[in-house]
Image (cartoon, rainbow, N blue to C red):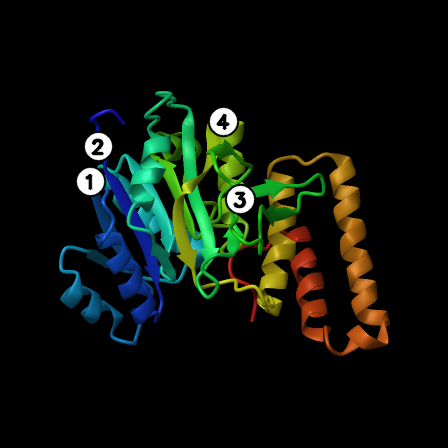
Amino acid sequence: MAGRMPHVVSVILNTNRREDTLACLASLQANDYPNHTALVLDNASTDGSVEAIRAQFPSVQVLALAENRGYAGNNNVGIAAALAQGADWVFVLNEDTILAPDCLRQLMAVAEGDDTDDDTIGIVGPLVLHHDEPTVIQSAGGALGRDWQARHLGQNQPDAGQFREPRPVDWISGCAILVRRAVIEQVGMLDERFFYYWEETEWCLRARRAGWQVVHVPQARLWHKGVQRDYRPSPSVTYYNTRNRLLMMAKHRAPLRAWLIVWFQLVRTLLSWSLRPKWRRVQQEHRTALWRGAFDFLRRRWGMRPA
């Protein structure tokens, strides 16, 4: 960074999460990176979020969303606004996150290459820890397997310093992803067809294929309240995970071997949830969500899951 202080704009999506959003903004305000502003997107909240944010953080801009376009589409409204305000970097941030006071500074030190002057770094992300278990890792960046399944590195491991140095990863957790302006201008914003789930993974893959580095920065720390260790995905997540994984594979032309593996996994899971007595009733909603996600992929139905 060497004297330069690029402008970072944080984009936070809020839907009736007043206390979480206020706590997130307080942690951003306490950060020691000087050239930063925050922008909150409010998705028709009825819990007094907008009034509370304006009262406690008058410098924070609040934009009311006209419609619910999902995580991808809603955040794109904020990303576009951040770019219009001259952001050099856009920090897409979940409202249920708490940043360490030096989180942004640590991210920017690597992003702008204090030591290397490397301007090929296009996306960076922090070490994400569980909020309810502050020394347990939720995500140390992500890897994309041969079967095109995305997994969090270090997930649920105690933080024992095993992640010490910044390193390239396949993708960054969408709860806190910092993206260079030039990346967005080159590859575009989040793909709104995904609506929810997989959009950040696809964004990172798109950037990497355009020649940008995606880097995890373990010195930057952040605590995320969502996806706790005992997290059990809802049928809605099963639907989006199924459809959007297939969408990503199609968009990025996954090899035939990967398609065979994934379809085999889907059919095997459907049969297990349908035929095995212990799963037949318990997984009924997930079974429906899985086949519906696969079917909607085949007929190219994107956006919000059907009611």
* Mark whose residue sits in front, 2 or 3: 2
Residue type at the position of mark 4: Ala
Q: Are marks 4 and 2 in contact (CB under 8 Å)?
A: no
Q: Say which residue appears at 56% left-offset and 43% top-offset.
A: 142
Q: Are marks 1 and 4 in contact (CB under 8 Å)?
A: no
Position above or below: 166 against 99:
above
Q: Of marks 2 and 3, which one's residue comes earlier in the chain?
A: 2
Which residue is label 2 attached to? 5
* Mark nearer the N terminus (3 vs 4): 3
Image location of residue 220, percent across then percent down: 38, 44
Of the numbered discs 4 and 2, the one sitting upstream in the chain is 2
Residue at figure coordinates x 58%, y 52% from the top left: 155
Give the residue number, with chain letter if any, for mark 1: 35
Nearer the viewer's eye, disc 4 or disc 2? 2
Tag 3: residue type?
A: Thr
Q: Which residue carries the number 4 mark?
A: 210
Assess whether mark 2 and mark 1 are in contact (beta carbons under 8 angstroms): yes
Judge left or right: residue 283 versus residue 212. Answer: right
Disc 1 to disc 3, how far (Cα)? 27 Å
Q: Residue at x 45, y 47 (%)?
A: 127
Task: Give percent across and percent down for residue 68.
Answer: 39, 62
What type is the residue that disc 2 sits on?
Met
Q: Residues within 10 Å of mark 4 (few under 14, many from 20)?
A: few
Label 2: which secondary element: loop
Q: Residue at label 3? A: 201
